[in-house]
Amino acid sequence: MSEKINLTVIGGGPGGYVAAFFAADLGMNVTLVDLEKNPGGVCLYRGCIPSKALLHVAKLIHEAEQAKNWGVEFGNPKIDLDKLRNFKNNVVSKLTGGLGQIAKQRKVNFIQGRASFINSNKLKIETVDGKTIEHSFDKAIVATGSVIATIPSLNIQSKRLLNSTSALDLPEIPKSLLVVGGGYIGLELGSVYQALGTQVSVVEMLPNILPGADRDLVNFLVKRVKETFAEVMTSSKVLEMKEIDNAISVKIQDDKGNVVEKSYDYVLMSIGRKPETRGLGLENTKVTLTERGWIKVNKQMQTTDPSIYAIGDIAGEPMLAHKASHEGRVAVEAIAGHKVAFEPMAIPAVVFTDPEVAWAGLTEEEAKKQGIKYEVAKFPWAASGRAITLDRTDGVTKLIVDPETQRLLGIGICGPNAGELISEGVLAIEMGANVTDIKLTIHPHPTLSETIMDAAEVFFGQSAHYYVKPRK
Amino acid sequence: MQKEFKLPELGENIESADIVNVLVNEGDFIKKDQGVVEIETDKATIEVPSTIEGKITKLFVKAGDKIKVGSTIMIVEEEVAEPEKQTEAPAEQKKEEKPTEVKTEKPSESKAATAPKVSGKKEIVEFHLPDLGENIESADVVNVLVNVGDVIEKDQGIIEIETDKATIEVPSTVSGRVVEVLVKAGEKAKVGQTIIKVETSEAQEVKVAEAPKVEQKQEEKSEEVKKETPRAVTTEIRGELPALHPMELDEQPPILKGAAPAAPSVRRLAREIGVDINKVPGTGPGGRITMDDVKAFSKKLHESRTESGFTTGIKAEALPDFSKFGEIRKVEMSNIRKKTAEHLSYAWATIPHVTQFDKADITNLEKTRKELSKIVEKSGAKLTVTGILVKVIVEALKKFPQFNSSIDMEKKEIIYKNYYNIGIAVDTERGLIVPVIKDADKKSLTQISVEMNLLAEKARTKKIGLEDLQGGCFTITNLGGIGGTYFTPIVNSPEVAILGVSRSSYEPIWNGYGVFEPRLMLPLSLSYDHRIIDGADAIRFLRFIVESLEQPMKLLL
């Protein structure tokens, strides 16, 4: 770079701040614009991070309870909601504050405000202290993320109607909670409240919770949820909601088409997230959108406006923090003139319920749909020594393999720590590893990670711990 | 009825060709003999004319593609009438039958021509240098074909550019009035750079606004099209619908479709050094591609590049940094230049050349030529010395068959030819090419003159076909029009001899009776392949030519 590139990143989430910091490392003049006091975005302030803090606590409560079976009894937990909230808030402020520090160290010009494009090289920024500034850039990266999707007809004005943000604030421990939408957000937050003592019900429009995920994996979670939750209503939908005395009355059409009316202390709407480009002034640029409202980008994350890039949720699915970060790095390198492209072989997805569900690469369902030849190798955790010591045999490790090259095409894991375990599979897919590679890699004993090696052995019919007919 | 148009036979040994330019778009009406694509083979750039007529429903090629003889270039709907005739048909039916492109395009054409008068919205649209094909980032502008104020139509040529592949005309994707021209001849233009700004007629905008429902369909359609013809995209629809930039095209198949088994670091290396990872043979288990595989593949690629350009076994000396000594300008070789360089290096390095000089007294011949030229001119061509030489050389080849041969060193064979095709070197602005007069022995001098004229014209207007450039037995290169006395031409391998002709001039010639007479003398230089032609034969051959020119009656003996 002969002259320093002036890069402006709009949005300080895990896409935006990674891009901004990396760009600073590459010697660009970087401005990062975000509404919050520090970088972090939804992920750190209102998403992945605070929910994980609470889920950790939820897991602890469950394990303490389960300990009865092992001869250890703690008695019923006493929950100090303020303290719990503080713990969560501290986690958030520690991380976001840390990012603010790092931004300073990297000499990233952080502006707290809202930015919109005036044209392809200029932004208007309304700062939180009421100033409006015009800000020129050579290149901009739009990383403004997504917003919570709502159903207008169900959008009643009530403090008892929660969304993923307000639910994290733990207003109280309700006696009953209805979670509308059986996706990962609803199940994660539902699990938290369930652990804290709430009777949680879930209503999902589709025939399964966690639609889109592999049934082999989800089955363990379904079983658990059905055991612990008050009710799981699939193929059902909410028709109407209204606030009544200290509760919300909900009309639900169940899987048989009957309409039932029930009331809950609180209702959590968690039907998903969607892109939001209004207010960004994109109409003043050459940026175009896809039919579904995401910004159109190429493999360099460049939009149809050559000076503007887009990353993260706003640039399309999957809406995952780690995808955003990776895209941010690609965009920055492309801006720096490197020959790069966003072309991962696999993007891992993790649902942090208990048990956790994680997968990466090709799923069985997708292989079927696309007519791709595949073979499956499954290792049930009931055969894992480590899982048995944890008294958690409700898991499975599943490999999707190309029968011709025996290359790993996809991996799915269900069970405690599946989110941690999945990375090995992602690396294997990225490296083009075949099942033999996995089989021949020594895994430590006794660990849950062994199940991946075991699954590879199952592929050949050679697992020591799980008998299947050997391959001819 | 749908008909496929395939790449026709291009001539001996030519199996495929590079497309340098696609001259039509999907939705266009194409006439018989209208150019479809401009292709480049190692011999020349030629236009392939259509053999069918109708509306192009599908186009399978784009600039930069390599296509094989017999592969389908486009599908043409034969029975659809031309749009003018269609105006009678009810409007709805029209909409159904063909997608909107035609619809938006037609009014804009007519309105652009008759200056805009409706108070509709006009738009200034930038026309960018489109993607020119893989790895081409910029091109030299050789010529700007439009001026400010010109009304241009879609597909009209805007600039002529030269890339390493060929000189091509870049057609406009918009119609309207040129308000600004941002490039000059001699400049380098980058892909994506704005070339001109055009004020579009309001028609395009208005149409879209009228039919918002249709617009959505259009966009879908344009996306479909984009996959195949990334150039022709978008602009028809909205004046300017910005397109994603070309890098989008360098797809690496996703893992689902059998992507190369290579680690991310290996894939990145490949991308950086410009190697298509999917083409690299992997040596690891399961065909896994290692870092070394990519490097080896890249090395092989470079080697084969230099192999195809003949290597003499002599190591190239490093060039000094010329800019230390003064101002320099670097220009990439045109493709014809590269081929010429390779071909001539090969000929020079493999053929042991000897050049024999002589001169012919053409005083009498010139008199006759001028007289006879009047007769030939009735057929539309002049009688030239070169034309006469073609006829003379045919006779010389008959008399000295070793001059009408080729050598096969591998098989240790000499191939004698019983046909007489004479090549004539033509200087074009894009470089040297050699059209061939076929069966010159069977043609009259008038026929030869007319044909020479035609071929030279075709060569200059890029219309020359490959068949016109193949099958030569012997080459004549006449530099006399420019000047010079003698030169040493290089044999046009696999031919074995070449005749160089320089400028004739009056010289005092001793007439044998005590007087110097002014005689018009024509210097001739005969280069020949000493492997097959001995020196004595060469001078006999050349003397035969000289004497035939001095005393044409001899040819009849």
Image (cartoon, rainbow, N blue to C red):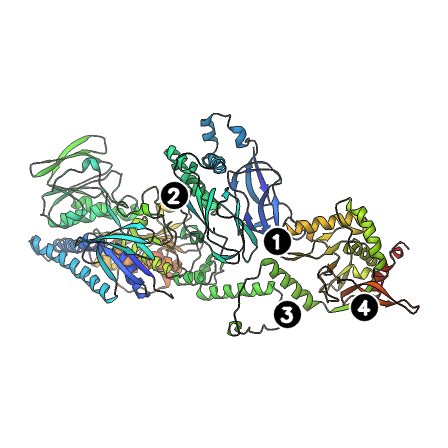
Q: Pointer 2: what residue?
A: A369
Q: In this view, does B345 lie to the left or right of A215?
A: right
User: Residue beneath label 3, please?
Assistant: B312
What is the crowding at mark 1: few (fewer than 14 residues within 10 Å), some, or many (at least 20)? some
Mark 1 touches mark 3? (CB < 8 Å): no
Residue wearing tag 1: B41
Identity of the amino acid at label 4? Answer: Asp
Q: How far apart are marks 1 and 4 (CA)?
A: 35 Å
Decide which of tag 3 and tag 4 comes sooner along the chain: 3
Chain designation of label 2: A
Q: Nearer the viewer, mark 4 or mark 2?
A: 4
The kind of residue on which mark 2 rests is Lys
* Left or right placement of residue A183 versus residue A360 in this view: left
Q: In the visual, does A370 lie left or right of B49?
A: left
**Residue under label 4:** B534
Judged from the image, the secondary structure of the residue bearing numbered disc 1 is loop
Marks 2 and 1 belong to one chain: no
The image position of residue B297, as x and y in percent, is 50, 63
Residue A454 appears in view: no
B223 or B331, which lies in front? B331
Residue A326: give x, y in percent of width and height.
Answer: 32, 57
Is A263 rendered above or below residue A345?
Answer: above
**Real-space Cα separation, disc 4 to disc 2, in angstroms:** 75 Å
Element assignment for label 4: loop
Identify the amino acid type marked 3.
Thr
Q: In which quarter of the image is the C terminus of chain A?
A: bottom left
| Chain containing the residue with disc 4 | B
- Residue in view at x 31 percent, y 57 percent: A137
Within 10 Å of the Cα at label 4, are there few (<14), some (14-19), or many (20+) other Cα atoms?
some
